[in-house]
Image: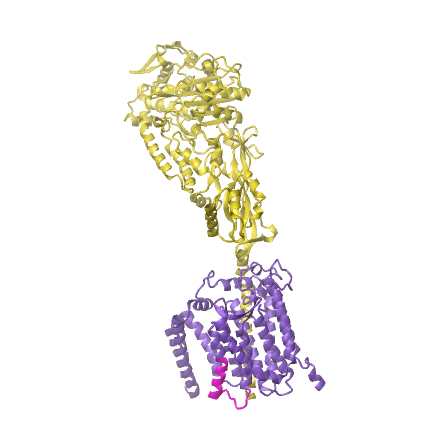
C-alpha cells in the first residue's frame, strides 16, 4: 500500500502550483494592473455641483433692481419615508391626496434611494410654517434654492429673464451647462450671463453602492467652492425708470434717456411692460403664455427693437449736415408759403401753416418742412441731378455717422439696426437711377424709408448735446467693485460736424421748448432743448420728442415715442420733460401750462388691438424671432402653450403684409 | 503513559491548531469590516454578523475540545451513523429547505440561525470514505470496491446537485486526490486535468470540430514519433477517443442542457461575456476591491469597496475581497501562505499515520480545504466561475466554520493518537 507513498509529492506539487497560480494572478491584479484603484475611486466618488447665487443687478445709485430670494424645495427620498399622517402633510403643502400619491409615484419612479423634488419653490412664508413640522415626516427634507426677485417690479425688458437651458444650449456649452441649469434668456441676464452666473462649485462626496452620500471625499481636499455671481451696477436711475414706467402706463412706446457725457443709459422704458416677478416661480409658464398672446407684445424691447420714423426730430441732424457741407449758413433764409414743391411733389407744412421767412433756428423752432426740404434738395443736387445717387450716398454716410442704420453696440441682445436707405435701395424701388431728390425728399423731414429705434434717436441728442460726438450707449457701468466698461464705451465717436455749427441749431431747439411746438412742456428754471415729431401713419400718429438738458453742460438726453399719441408736443414732450426734471431736480414742480404727472400717467392711448398688430415693426421679425424662439424653447418644456405659439406666427405674417401700406406719411 | 493519555492535549499538533486559530481570527476581523454596522460598532455585538461569527468561533473551540476528549475508536465507529444523518438532512432540506440565492440549502433553526447540511456532508463523507477504504480486502483497483467508493462520494453529490448547489457538489470531486493517493491510476488524475482544459477550450471557442481535429493531429504526431512503444500508442488512442467524446458531450451539454445563468457564469470566467453590470457585476467589483488594495492595502476598515458595499455577498463568499482590499498583496500572501502551510502540514501529518484510516481521512481533509480555497479565491479574482462556496474558516457562516472545525480537529485527534492503531 505504501508503494504509493511517493504520490504525496505529486499531490503537494499540485497544491503548491495552484496556490502559486492564485498568487500570481493576485500579484497581477494588485501590483501590476493599476486600473482597479481608478475604478475603486470612480465607484465611490460622486461630484455634486453647488450652485452659486446669481449676481444681483443694481441701479446707478446702488438701489436693487433684481436680487435673489431664498425659496425652498421639499425633497423626498422614498426609501426613508415611514408611514405618517398623510392628511396633515397634504394640508401643510396645500395639495390633495391624489396629488400626493401622484408625486410619490413620480419620486419612486425616479429613484427609491435618491432624493427628488416633491414640492418646488415654496415661499419663505409657507416654509416657515412647514419647517417646524417637517421633522415629523421622515424622508422629506428641504433644499434651499435662489429665485430672482424684483423689489420694484420695474425694468422688465432691460433686465430680461432667466430660464432652464435648452438641450441645444447644453450641447453647445461644452459641459458648462447641465439639464436643470438656468441661463439668461433676454436682457442683461443674457448679455452678462457669464458674469452673473458665477462659478459652480464642486463637492466631492463618497457614495455607497446605492448612491447614498456617506461624507466628504479626501476630507474635501479636492472640493472647489462655488463663487457667487458678480454684482452688476447698471447705469439705470431707478427714480426716473419708475416715473417713466408710470407715465407710459396705458400707452405703447418707449423712453430712452442717456447721460451724454458718458453714454450711460439712465432710463429704459418699454411699454407695455410687465412685472418681472411674473417670470419667476411656479406660475411662470402660465404668466408667460398670457403675455405671449398679448397683441401689444410686452416682450418686445421697444427702445431697441421697435422701428419708428423719426419725423421732425430728424430735422436738427438734417440741418447740421447741410451746415457742415457748406450748403447753407445759419443765415440762409427760406420763404415758407405753407407748401414746398419738390418738383411736382408737394411737401406741406403741418396744418399748411405759413411760416414766412425762416432761417435755421426759426425753421427748427417752427418745424418748417419747406425749409428742410429745400436744404435737402440743395445737398442732393449739388453735383447735378445726374449724380443724385452718388451725392445721396455721401449724404447717407454723414447721417450714418450719427448711428442711424446700424447697431450702436448696446450691451443688450437683439438690438435693431433701424433702416437708413441707400441709393441702391431706391435703384431697386424705381428700377434704375432715374430717381431724383424730389422723389426722396420726405427723408429731409425724417420720413420715407428712414426708420430708427428710440435708442438711436436718444443717441443723436447726445451727439448734439456734446456738440459733435457721442459715447456708445451702454447699460452696465460696473461689475462687482470694479468699474469696468468695455474700452469701446470710453471712446468718443465723432459725428463729423464741427462744434461751431451746433450753437444756432441748439438755439432753435431751445426755442422749440420755450415758445415752439413743445411750449407746454417747458420746465421752470431748466433750459431744455428739444424737437418734437409727429409721424402720421394712416389715421393715427406717433408722438415723438427728443431733447437734452440743461443747455449748458447737458446731463441728460432723452427720446420719447408714444405710439398712437398724435402730435409730439402733446404726449411725448410732457413725458420727456417730467423725466428730465425728475432726473435733474428729483422733484416735479408745478408747470405754467398746468400739465401734471397724474394726468399723463392715467391717460389711455392704447390702440385697437385688431388694427395694431405689428404696425411699426416690419423689418423686426427676424430679431424678434430669435427671442421668441429662445423663449418658446423654454416654454415648450412646460408644454402648455403650443396654441399660442401658432397664433403668434400667423399674426406676424399679417404684419408683414401690412408693411407696404405704411408708406405715405405727412409730417407737421 | 496512562497519565499522558488522560491529558487531551497530549500529542496535539499545535501547528495546525495555531493556523486554525489564525485563520478564524483573520476571518472574524474581516467580517467586522465587511459587515460593519455603524449602529453596532462593537466587534462583540451579537446583533451583528461579526458578533455572531464570534459565537460560532466559541462554539467551534468548544467542539474542538469535545472532539479531543472523544475516543478515536468512537469517531471511526460513528462514521456510518453520521453519513446516514447528513444524507437524511440533505433529503430533508430538499423538502423544507430555505431558499437563498436560488439554492435550497438551508434548514431554518429559528432565531436567525440556519443549518446548511451540505457543509456537514463533506465531513461525514470524508469519515465514511476513510472508514471504508481502510477496511481489509478493499482495493481501489477492484471494480466492486471502486464502485462502492464512487457511491459513497456520489450519493451526497447527487443530493446536493438537486438543491442545486453546484459549488458544494464540485467540492466532492476533489476527493479524487484521496483515491489517487490510495492507488487510483494516475490516468484518472491526468484525465481530470485534461477534461478541465478541454472544457474551457470547448466553451471558449465553441467549435468542437476544430478541437477534435487538433486532438487527432496531436495524437498522430505522438504515435508517429513513438510508434515503437505500443503501450503508449494504445494509451494515446484511448485518450483520444475519450477526449473527443468529452469535447462533443461538453458542447452538447453547454448548448442544450445548461441553464442560461449557469452558462453566463462559465462564460464570464473563460472571458466570453464582458458584461460588468449584470452577471459579471460581482466578480468585476470583487476584482476592483482586491486590485485597489495594491501592496499594503488600504488599512483595516478603510476599503471603500468594502465599506460602501460594492461587492455583494462580501462577508460570506466574497470575504477575500476585504482581505485583498484592506490588507493588500501582503495580506493575500499571508492568507494563501497560511492555507498552503496548512495543506502541506496535513499531508505531512497524513504520512506519519500508522493507521490507513487516519491517513485517508487526512487526505480527505486536505482535498476539501484545497478545493474550497482554490474555487473561492479563484472566483474572487476571476479565474474560476463564480460558484458560491465559502473560504474555509474565514467566510461568515456557522455551518461552514463548524464543519471545518470538525474536519480539522478530528484529524488532530486521530493524529494525537497516531501511536495506537485505530481499526475501523
Q: Is residue B20 left or right of residue A417?
A: right
Q: Position of residue A112 (x, y in %)?
A: 50, 53
Screen quadrant of the N terminus of chain A: bottom right
Q: Is residue A219 left or right of residue A359?
A: right
Q: Which chain is purple?
A: B
Q: Position of residue B244 (x, y in %)?
A: 39, 78
Q: Position of residue B149 (x, y in %)?
A: 50, 84
In the displayed structure, B123 sits above or below A297; it is: below
Query: Which residue occupies the foreground of this view, A590 or A585?
Result: A590
In the displayed structure, A581 sits above or below A113; it is: above
User: Which residue is drawn at the image coordinates 47% and 88% (left, top)?
Assistant: B144
Query: Which residue occupies the foreground of this view, A141 or A356?
Result: A141
In the displayed structure, A352 sits above or below A105; it is: above
Q: Which chain is yellow?
A: A
Q: Which residues are magenta?
A: B134-154
Residue A293's quadrant in the figure? top left
> What is the number of callouts on the image?
0
Query: Which residue occupies the foreground of this view, A223 or B364?
Result: B364
- Residue B298 visible in rendering: yes
- Residue A495 visible in rendering: no
Task: Indicate yes or no whether the magenta region holds residue B72.
Answer: no
In the displayed structure, A609 sits above or below A193; it is: above
Q: Is residue A297 left or right of residue B85?
A: left
Query: Which residue occupies the foreground of this view, B24 or B102?
Result: B102
Amino acid at each position: 500500500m505504501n508503494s504509493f507513498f511517493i504520490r504525496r509529492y505529486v499531490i503537494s506539487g499540485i497544491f503548491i502550483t495552484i496556490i502559486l497560480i492564485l498568487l500570481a494572478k493576485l500579484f497581477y491584479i494588485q501590483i501590476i494592473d493599476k486600473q482597479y484603484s481608478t475604478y475603486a475611486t470612480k465607484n465611490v466618488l460622486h461630484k455634486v455641483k453647488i450652485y452659486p447665487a446669481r449676481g444681483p443687478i443694481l441701479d446707478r445709485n446702488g438701489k436693487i433692481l433684481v436680487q435673489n430670494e431664498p425659496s425652498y424645495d421639499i425633497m423626498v427620498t422614498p426609501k426613508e419615508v415611514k408611514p405618517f399622517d398623510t392628511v396633515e402633510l397634504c394640508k401643510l403643502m396645500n395639495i390633495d391626496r391624489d396629488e400626493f400619491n401622484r408625486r410619490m409615484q413620480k419620486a419612486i419612479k425616479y429613484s427609491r434611494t435618491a432624493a427628488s423634488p416633491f414640492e418646488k419653490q415654496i415661499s419663505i412664508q409657507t416654509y416657515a410654517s412647514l419647517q417646524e413640522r417637517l421633522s415629523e415626516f421622515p424622508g422629506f427634507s428641504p433644499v434651499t434654492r435662489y429665485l430672482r426677485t424684483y423689489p420694484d417690479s420695474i425694468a422688465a425688458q432691460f433686465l430680461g429673464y432667466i430660464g432652464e437651458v435648452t438641450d441645444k444650449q447644453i450641447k453647445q456649452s461644452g459641459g458648462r451647462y447641465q439639464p436643470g441649469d438656468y441661463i439668461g434668456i433676454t436682457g442683461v441676464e443674457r448679455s452678462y450671463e457669464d458674469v452673473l452666473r458665477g462659478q459652480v462649485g464642486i463637492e466631492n462626496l463618497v457614495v455607497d453602492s446605492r448612491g447614498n452620500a456617506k461624507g466628504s471625499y479626501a476630507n474635501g481636499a479636492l472640493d472647489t467652492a462655488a463663487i457667487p455671481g458678480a454684482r452688476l451696477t447698471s447705469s439705470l436711475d431707478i427714480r426716473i425708470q419708475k416715473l417713466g414706467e408710470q407715465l407710459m402706463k396705458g400707452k405703447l412706446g418707449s423712453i430712452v434717456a442717456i447721460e451724454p457725457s458718458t453714454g450711460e443709459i439712465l432710463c429704459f422704458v418699454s411699454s407695455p411692460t410687465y412685472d418681472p416677478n411674473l417670470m419667476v416661480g411656479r406660475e411662470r409658464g402660465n404668466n408667460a403664455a398670457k403675455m405671449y398672446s398679448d397683441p401689444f407684445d410686452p416682450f418686445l424691447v421697444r427702445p431697441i427693437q421697435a422701428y419708428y420714423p423719426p419725423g421732425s426730430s430728424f430735422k436738427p441732424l438734417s440741418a447740421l449736415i447741410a451746415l457742415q457741407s457748406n450748403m447753407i449758413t445759419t443765415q440762409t433764409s427760406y420763404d415758407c408759403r405753407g407748401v414746398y414743391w419738390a418738383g411736382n411733389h408737394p411737401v406741406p407744412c403741418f396744418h399748411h401753416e405759413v411760416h414766412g421767412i425762416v432761417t435755421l433756428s426759426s425753421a427748427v423752432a417752427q418745424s418748417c418742412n419747406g425749409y428742410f426740404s429745400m436744404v435737402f434738395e440743395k445737398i442732393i443736387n449739388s453735383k447735378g441731378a445726374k449724380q443724385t445717387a452718388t451725392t445721396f450716398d455721401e449724404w447717407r454716410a454723414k447721417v450714418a455717422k450719427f448711428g442711424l442704420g446700424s447697431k450702436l453696440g448696446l450691451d443688450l441682445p437683439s438690438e435693431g439696426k433701424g433702416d437708413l436707405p441707400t441709393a441702391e435701395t431706391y435703384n431697386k424701388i424705381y428700377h434704375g437711377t432715374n430717381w431724383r431728390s424730389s422723389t426722396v425728399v420726405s427723408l429731409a423731414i425724417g420720413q420715407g424709408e428712414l426708420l430708427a429705434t428710440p435708442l438711436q434717436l436718444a443717441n443723436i441728442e447726445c451727439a448734439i448735446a456734446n456738440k459733435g460726438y457721442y459715447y456708445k450707449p451702454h447699460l452696465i457701468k460696473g461689475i462687482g467693485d470694479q468699474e469696468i466698461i468695455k474700452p469701446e464705451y470710453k471712446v468718443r465717436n465723432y459725428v463729423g460736424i464741427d462744434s461751431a455749427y451746433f450753437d444756432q441749431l441748439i438755439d432753435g431747439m431751445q426755442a422749440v421748448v420755450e415758445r415752439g411746438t413743445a411750449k407746454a412742456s417747458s420746465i421752470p428754471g431748466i433750459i431744455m432743448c428739444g424737437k418734437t415729431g409727429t409721424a402720421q401713419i394712416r389715421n393715427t400718429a406717433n408722438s415723438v420728442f427728443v431733447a437734452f438738458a440743461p443747455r449748458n453742460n447737458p446731463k441728460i438726453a432723452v427720446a420719447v415715442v408714444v405710439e398712437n399719441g398724435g402730435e409730439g408736443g402733446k404726449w411725448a414732450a410732457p413725458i420727456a420733460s417730467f423725466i428730465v426734471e425728475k432726473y435733474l431736480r428729483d422733484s416735479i414742480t408745478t408747470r405754467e401750462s398746468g400739465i401734471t404727472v397724474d394726468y399723463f400717467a392715467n391717460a389711455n392711448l392704447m390702440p385697437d388691438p385688431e388694427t395694431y398688430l405689428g404696425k411699426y415693426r416690419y423689418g423686426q421679425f427676424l430679431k424678434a424671432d430669435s427671442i421668441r424662439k429662445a423663449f418658446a424653447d423654454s416654454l415648450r418644456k412646460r408644454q402648455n402653450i403650443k396654441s399660442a405659439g401658432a397664433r403668434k406666427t400667423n399674426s406676424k405674417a399679417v404684419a408683414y403684409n401690412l408693411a407696404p401700406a405704411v408708406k405715405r406719411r405727412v409730417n407737421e | 503513559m496512562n497519565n499522558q493519555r488522560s491529558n487531551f492535549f497530549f500529542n496535539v499538533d499545535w501547528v495546525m491548531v495555531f493556523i486554525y486559530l489564525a485563520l478564524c481570527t483573520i476571518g472574524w476581523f474581516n467580517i467586522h469590516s465587511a459587515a460593519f454596522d455603524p449602529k453596532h460598532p462593537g466587534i462583540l455585538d451579537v446583533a451583528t454578523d461579526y458578533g455572531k461569527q464570534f459565537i460560532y468561533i466559541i462554539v467551534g473551540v468548544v467542539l474542538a475540545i469535545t472532539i479531543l476528549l472523544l475516543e478515536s475508536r468512537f469517531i471511526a465507529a460513528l462514521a456510518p451513523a453520521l453519513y446516514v444523518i447528513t444524507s437524511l438532512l440533505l433529503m430533508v432540506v430538499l423538502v423544507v429547505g430555505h431558499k437563498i440565492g436560488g439554492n435550497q440549502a438551508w434548514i431554518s433553526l429559528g432565531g436567525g440561525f440556519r443549518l446548511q447540511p451540505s457543509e456537514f456532508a463533506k465531513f461525514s463523507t470524508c469519515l465514511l470514505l476513510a472508514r471504508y477504504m481502510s477496511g481489509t480486502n478493499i482495493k481501489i483497483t477492484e471494480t466492486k470496491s471502486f464502485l462502492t467508493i464512487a457511491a459513497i462520494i456520489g450519493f451526497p453529490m447527487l443530493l446536493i446537485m438537486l438543491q442545486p448547489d453546484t459549488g458544494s457538489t464540485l467540492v466532492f470531486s476533489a476527493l479524487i486526490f484521496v483515491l489517487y493517493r490510495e492507488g487510483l491510476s494516475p490516468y484518472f488524475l491526468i484525465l481530470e486535468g485534461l477534461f478541465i482544459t478541454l472544457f474551457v477550450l470547448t466553451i471558449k471557442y465553441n467549435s468542437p470540430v476544430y478541437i477534435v481535429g487538433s486532438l487527432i493531429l496531436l495524437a498522430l504526431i505522438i504515435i508517429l514519433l513513438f510508434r515503437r512503444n505500443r503501450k503508449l500508442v494504445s494509451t494515446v488512442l484511448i485518450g483520444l477517443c475519450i477526449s473527443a467524446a468529452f469535447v462533443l458531450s461538453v458542447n452538447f451539454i453547454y448548448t442544450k442542457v445548461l441553464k442560461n445563468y449557469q452558462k453566463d457564469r462559465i462564460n464570464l470566467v473563460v472571458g466570453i461575456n464582458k458584461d460588468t453590470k449584470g452577471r459579471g457585476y460581482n466578480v468585476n467589483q470583487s476584482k476592483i476591491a482586491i486590485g485597489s488594495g495594491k501592496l499594503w492595502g488600504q488599512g483595516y476598515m478603510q476599503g471603500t469597496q468594502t465599506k460602501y458595499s460594492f461587492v455583494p455577498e462580501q462577508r460570506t463568499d466574497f470575504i477575500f475581497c476585504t482581505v485583498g482590499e484592506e490588507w493588500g498583496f501582503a495580506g493575500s500572501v499571508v492568507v494563501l501562505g497560511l492555507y498552503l502551510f496548512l495543506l502541506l502540514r496535513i499531508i505531512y501529518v497524513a504520512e506519519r499515520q500508522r493507521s490507513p484510516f487516519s491517513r485517508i481521512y487526512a487526505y480527505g481533509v486536505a482535498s476539501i480545504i484545497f478545493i474550497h480555497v482554490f474555487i473561492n479565491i479563484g472566483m474572487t479574482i476571476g479565474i474560476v466561475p463564480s460558484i458560491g462556496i465559502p473560504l474555509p474558516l474565514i467566510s461568515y457562516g456557522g455551518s461552514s466554520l463548524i464543519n471545518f472545525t470538525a474536519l480539522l480537529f478530528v484529524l488532530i485527534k486521530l493524529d494525537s493518537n497516531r501511536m495506537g492503531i485505530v481499526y475501523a
